[in-house]
Image (tube, rainbow, N blue to C red):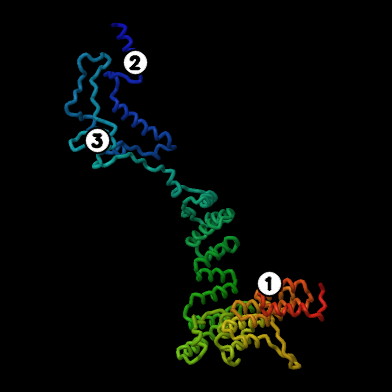
Amino acid sequence: MNRMKVDEEEYWHSSKCKAFTFDDEDDELSQLKESKRAVNSLRDIVDDDDDLEKFSWSGEPVGSISWSIRETASTNSTPEGSDLGLPKGSSSTASFPKQASSYSLSSFFKGRNKHGSFQSLSDALTDTGFKNYAPELRRPKAEYKDYDSIWSPKETVRRLQRGKVCSLERFQSLQEKLLLLDEAVAGHDGNVIIAVLVFLKRTLKKEILFQELELRQVALRHFIHFLKETGDQKLLLDLLRFLDRMEEVALTQYREHLTIQDAEKRKEFLKSCIGLPFSSEDSALVQDHYTLLERQIIIEANDKHLEAAGQTEIFRKHPRKASILNMPLVTTLFYSCFYHYNEAEGTFSSPANLKKTFKIPDKQYVLTALAARAKLRAWHDVDALFTTKNWLGYTKKKAPIGFHRVVEILQRNNAPVQILQEYVRLVEDVETKLNLAMKHKCHDVVIDTYKDLKDRLQLMAYRCKVDRGSPAEEKIDSILSNPQIRWKN
C-alpha cells in the first residue's frame, strides 16, 4: 500500500500536469501579473522613459484619478459568496488568508456584465454587445523631433534630401538663411534648392533676395525657372530688370500675348510690344507677327461674310472647318492657296501678296501651294506651278524642292497614274526614278528607262512582273524584237 502511495506521489510531481494545492497561486491572478510585467517591460525597449506612457488594462492612463479610484475599489471589494478564510486542515505554510481572485483574462478586454461580475472567456468571445478594451500606447516623442528639433543648415538639407519634414522657420537671421541656401546648392538637389528659395522669397525683401541671388548663379537659374513655371510675371520682370537683362524682359512681356484670347486685344498688345528693347532679329519677328494677325482679322471677316452669303463656289464645295485667326504663317499661306489662289497680288488674301510681304522662300511656297492645289485636284495649277519660261520663250519644268518630293505629295493626294508618270520622268537620278516608278506602277517609265539603259536582262525580268496581255507587256515585246537596238547584255 505504501509502495503504491509513493509511486502516485512521484507521478504527480514528475508529470507536466500538477495537482491542485492551496500553496499554488491562482492561475488567473498569475496570468494577470505576467501581463502587467510584460507591459511595464516595454519601457526598456524605448530609449527615453518619457516616450512611453503607461496604460492600465482598462485603457486608462496609469496614475490618473479614475485609475486610482478603480484600483482602490477593486482591492477592497470581493465577490459575493467567496470564502476568504483558509479551510480547515490547510498547510501551516499559509500564514494569512488569501483573497480569492475576481479577475479573469477575458475581464480585462471586456467590460463587466449586467450583473456587475466579470464575463468568462467563452462569454467574452461570443458576446458582441460589449465594448472592447485594448491598451493603446502613445507614439514615441522621437517621431515629433522633426518638427521642433534644432538642426544645422547642413543637417537640414540632408533631411530634406531624404524626404524628411523639418521646419525652416528657425533660420531667422540673414546669415543663417544664406548658409542654408549655400548648403542646398552644394547638395545638387533641385527640389531642395527650390524649397529653400521659396522660403527665402517669403521671408526676405526682394531687393535683398535679388542681390544675394546675383552672387549665386545656380540658385538664380533655379529661381528664374521657378518663377516662369509658376507664372509669377511681376516678380520675374522685377528680377530681370534688376539684372539688367532687358531683352529677356521684352521677351517675357511678349509671351503674355498667349494669355489673350480676343484677336483685337491681342493685336493691340502686339502693337505695344513693337517698341520693346528686342534684338534686331526678334524685333522683325514681332513686327511680322503683328502684321500677320492684322491680315488674318481682315481675311477672316471677309471670308466669313462670303461663306454666309453662299455665292462663292469654293466655299460651297469646301466649307471652312476652323477660323484662321492666330494661325501660323504656313497655315495662313495654305489657307490662302486653297481659297484665294487666283486672286490678284494687290489683295491681302492673295498667296503672292503673303509671299512677298513675309518674304517666304520659294521652297516653302512651292511645298505649301502644291499641297493645297493637289488636295483640290487642280492638276492644271500644279502643272503651272512648275512650268517656267526662259529668255528665248521656251518652257521647261523646274521644281526647287525636287521632283521626287513632288511625286510623294501627289501620291498622298491620290493623283492618277498619268499625272504621276509625268513627274516621275522628271526625276534626275536613275535609281530613284526606277524605284518610284515601280512603287507607283508607272510601267511606261520603267520600260523606257531600261530601254534607254539598253539593259535587255532587266527588261525581260520586268516583263514577268506585268499582267499577261497588258499594254505594258506588248510594249516590252515590241522593244525586245526591235533589231535596231544594240543591247549591252
Three-letter amino acid code at the position of disc 1 = Lys
Q: Secondary structure at mark 2?
A: helix
* Distance (Cα) linking label 2 and label 3: 34 Å
* Distance (Cα) linking label 2 and label 1: 107 Å
348 w.r.t. 460: above or below: below
Query: Is the Cβ of the residue at disc 2 closer than 8 Å to that at disc 1?
Result: no
Three-letter amino acid code at the position of disc 3 = Asp
Three-letter amino acid code at the position of disc 2 = His
* Lower sequence index among marks 2 and 1: 2
* Lower sequence index among marks 1 and 3: 3
The residue beneath circle 3 is 123
Q: Residue at x 51, y 90 (%)?
A: 313
All told, the count of numbered labels is 3
Binning the other alpha carbons within 10 Å of mark 3 as few (below 14), some (14 to 19) or many (20 upward) gives few
Residue 122, quarter of picture: top left
* Lower sequence index among marks 2 and 3: 2
x then y, percent, for residue 145: 44, 46
Residue 36's label in the rendered image is none
The residue beneath circle 1 is 465
The residue beneath circle 2 is 13
